[in-house]
Image (cartoon, rainbow, N blue to C red):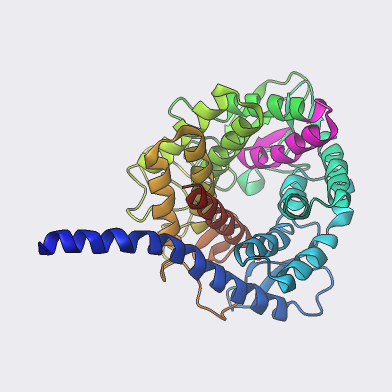
Amino acid sequence: MNKWILISLLLMSWMPTQKIDLVQDNAKFADKQMRFMLQQLDGSKDSFPHSIYPEGKLKLVDIYGWTSGFFPGSLWLTYELNKKDTFLLREAKEWTKKLEPIKDLTSNHDIGFMMYCSYGNAYRITKNEAYKNILIQAANSLCTRFNPKVGCIKSWDNAYTIGKKVYYQYPVIMDNMMNLELLCFASKVTHNPKYKEIAISHADKTLENNIRSDYSSFHVVNYDSLTGKPLFKVTHQGYANNSTWARGEAWGIYGFTMMYRETKQQRYLDAACNMANYFLNNKNLPKDKIPYWDFNISLLGYTPPIHYDTSKVSLFKRDASSAAVVCSALFELYGFTKQEHYYKDAVAILQSLSSPKYRNNEGKNGFLLNHSVGNFPGGYDIDVPLCYADYYFLEALNRYQQLNKKG
């Protein structure tokens, strides 16, 4: 047999095994890390892992921290990946139950993150009606933040722009797209259209005002609460007001993909595709497809609203959390479009995140991924593990596995 034919046959037999191994290897790693994290949290009544401090100590939040739902959600997703491990199921239930009081929270738009990542996965996997009822109440709480005049859910109360220069009257951030899934779910299970109508209104206003003509995005749009008109557009976690914060773009890609799934409205699919194309084809995206925390760092024409002392900290930090969000979204986007490049890019991101460069060392602090950036202008969570990077990494692995099962 010709040696090149033999090599080709060997490669063909090797490739599917690599697909399976990517999931299995990460599933085993996640199982070990979750167990290690649980050991560290032993005796912690209602504190949830968020990140780590510079000295390596766990950084925790209480149930009202916006990231509280990601760890219970990660337990559910790891349970799925590891073929229904009963220990993980018990822990997922216990950590989810701790968040029940949040169902009545009306002071925070992130109730969608907090409840749908935890209780949403719990209901999806178990079909327990008690979980469903709690989610419906959480959706009712989120609806209280909707202003019909603006057409959006208000993101923050009593907040100022970077440097506390200007007070936000009615801020709406790209992140808020992620909380609309809770509303779509509530309409689906109650057969009441009001929740989805609010989600559609918010998504349409975000599409109109947060997205630029090239499908890059503004992080924050501040509205006049009386007229509903935009007052100004700025960043809060990005490099400059006119730059593109990487995770903001990621939230948009994911959010509009989700809204297409829930509504089948073409404008949302178009937005998701165009934002994904902006992200993936950006000349400032590194070859391994793990972005810096902003696409326009130090470029001419982009002036940060605060001074950065680059002698103390490098501005060029990668953000694995943005990559994980996009990776998960791309697998779903591929399912809707059948455009192979979305699948290939998602796999490439998954492989990068699974590499020693970004995946954590086993037995170290309990997180899965390193090198994420939470809030660079705020000066915290810079180049650290983050719970939401782990969550969307696990979700991407689950989606990758499901796509391969379907062939």
Residue 87 sits above or below residue 167 on the image: below
User: Relative to the observer, which residue lies in front, 37 or 6?
Assistant: 6
Residue 374 sits above or below residue 407 on the image: below
Residue 192 sits above or below residue 404 on the image: above
Q: Residue at x 78, y 69 (%)?
A: 90
Describe residue 102's horizontal placement relative to residue 397 as left or right: right
Q: Quadrant of residue 82?
A: bottom right
Per the rendered image, the range of residues in magenta is 170-195
Query: Is residue 167 shown to the viewer in this render?
Result: no
Secondary structure that dominates the magenta span: helix
Q: Position of residue 368 (x, y in %)?
A: 56, 68
Q: Residue at x 77, y 47 (%)?
A: 111
Describe residue 402's horizontal placement relative to residue 345 as left or right: right
Residue placed farthest to the left in the image? 2
Residue 182 belongs to magenta span: yes
Q: Position of residue 377 (x, y in %)?
A: 56, 53
Residue 178 belongs to magenta span: yes
User: Relative to the observer, which residue lies in front, 367 or 128?
Assistant: 128
Residue placed farthest to the top in the image? 227
Q: Position of residue 400 (x, y in %)?
A: 50, 52
Q: Position of residue 265 (x, y in %)?
A: 60, 23
User: Relative to the observer, which residue lies in front, 322 or 240?
Assistant: 322
